[in-house]
Image (tube, rainbow, N blue to C red):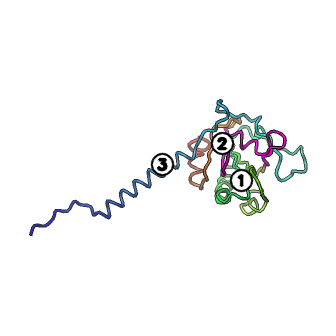
Amino acid sequence: MAKKKSSGMSARTQWGILIGIGALILGAIIFNGVREVADDGGSGVVTSEAFDLPNLQNRDDPNDRIRLSDFNGKPTVVNFFASWCDACDEELPAFRDVALELEDEVNFIFVNSNETGNWKPMAERNDILQFPLAQDIQGEPGRRNGLYRSLGVATGMPITAFYDAEGNLIDVARVPFNRTQLEVTLQQLQFTS
């Protein structure tokens, strides 16, 4: 009886390689889908005039505002959150940690939008009360979430907007971030070295 010649790889190894390649391809697709340029009606830029919101921690004072123009000079990351958004809750620690590390290079602002409950326990739990917190109520009278809608978002959270040092919107992500994804995105946008 003749021995069967071995092909060098077992079927199990071949399957492992195929699954690994598939995972890499899927990862690349997901990562590339993280970044999505906002649709603001065609110009591709939302200027800092579109960003003038009440300070969430001092809502009783109508003059206490958080304006994107106050943050010009450094790139700015605007992370939207809502108390009902589990993915927002999961990503906030990464945003907090990166914001603390990059405070000299990049501004971080947290915006409560699409809120149906109490925002404060999530903000406290994730220790973001130390950062600028805005309430997204801009828009037509009686309509909330004006900044959220201006980014071309119809529904869904989380969302993160990236503005350059002059206050121009350059990117919008509509998926949750972990720390590594956030750091890579900031490098790709040349917010960090």
**Is residue 162 covered in magenta?**
yes
x then y, percent, for residue 17: 35, 58
**Is residue 1 covered in magenta?**
no
At 68% from the left edge and 35% from the top edge, which residue is drawn? 168
Circle 1 is placed at which residue position? 81
- Crowd band around label 2 with a 10 angstrom C-alpha radius: few (<14), some (14–19), many (20+): many
Cα separation, mark 3 vs mark 1, equals 26 Å
- The local secondary structure at tag 3 comes to helix
Q: Disc number at residue 162?
A: 2
Q: What stretch is highlighted in magenta?
A: 134-163
- The local secondary structure at tag 1 comes to strand
x then y, percent, for residue 56: 82, 51
Circle 3 is placed at which residue position? 28
- Tag 2 near tag 1, CB within 8 Å: no
Quadrant of res 167: top right
Q: In this view, does 94 lie to the left or right of 184?
A: right
Establish if 46 lies above or below 103. Answer: above
Q: Is residue 129 left or right of residue 16?
A: right
Residue type, mark 1 in image: Phe
Q: In this view, does 86 lie to the left or right of 121?
A: left
At 59% from the left edge and 41% from the top edge, which residue is drawn? 36
| Magenta span: chief secondary structure | loop
Of mark 3 and mark 2, the one earlier in the sequence is 3
- Crowd band around label 3 with a 10 angstrom C-alpha radius: few (<14), some (14–19), many (20+): few
Establish if 152 lies above or below 6. Answer: above
In the image, farthest residue toward the bottom: 1
At 71% from the left edge and 48% from the top edge, which residue is drawn? 108
Establish if 160 lies above or below 150. Answer: below
